[in-house]
């Protein structure tokens, strides 16, 4: 699994960072989007991190406009 900004970066460092997705790959070559975390128009989401804990939960964190940190937990089946 990966958390990433799906847009192509622009001239400025923050361009393309207003959308954030989670994708999964079984082979490391083909990726399928699972969740759209953010679908903004001018916000900046960056520095995503993702881990799976021993109980199978997926923990995701990332910055929001470099002022706040968002934290989410997903249960897996």
Image (cartoon, rainbow, N blue to C red):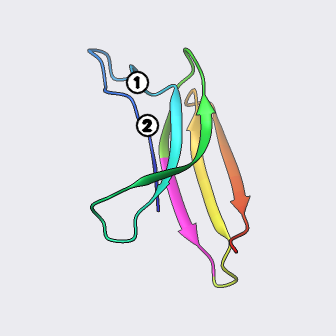
Does 31 lie within the magenta span?
no
**Closest to the observer: 47 or 37?**
37
Q: Residues within 10 Å of mark 1 (few under 14, many from 20)?
A: many
Determine whether 20 is above or below 15 in the image. Answer: below
Whether pointer 1 and pointer 2 mark residues with C-beta atoms closer than 8 Å, the reply is yes
Name the residue at 30% across, 18% down. Answer: 10
The number of numbered discs placed on residues in the rendered structure image is: 2
Classify mark 2: helix, strand or loop. loop
Name the residue at 31% across, 25% down. Answer: 9
| Residue 62 point in image, percent of width and height | 57, 45
Which residue bears the numbered disc 2? 5
**Closest to the observer: 1 or 14?**
1
Q: Which mark is residue 45?
A: none
Name the residue at 57% across, 21% down. Answer: 43
Which residue bears the numbered disc 1? 16
Distance from label 1 to label 2 (Cα)? 7 Å
Determine whether 56 is above or below 9 in the image. Answer: below
Name the residue at 45% across, 28% down. Answer: 17
Q: Is residue 24 left or right of residue 71?
A: left
Q: Is residue 64 left or right of residue 13?
A: right
Q: Is residue 19 left or right of residue 12?
A: right
Q: Which residues are magenta?
A: 48-53
Determine whether 20 is above or below 16 in the image. Answer: below
């Amino acid at each position: 699994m990966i958390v990433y900004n799906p847009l192509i970066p622009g001239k400025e460092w923050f361009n393309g960072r207003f959308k954030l997705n989670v994708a999964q790959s079984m082979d490391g070559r083909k990726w399928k989007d699972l969740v759209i975390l953010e679908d903004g128009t001018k916000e900046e989401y960056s520095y995503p991190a993702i881990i799976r804990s021993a109980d199978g939960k997926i923990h995701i964190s990332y910055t929001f406009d470099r002022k706040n940190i968002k934290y989410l937990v997903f249960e897996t089946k």
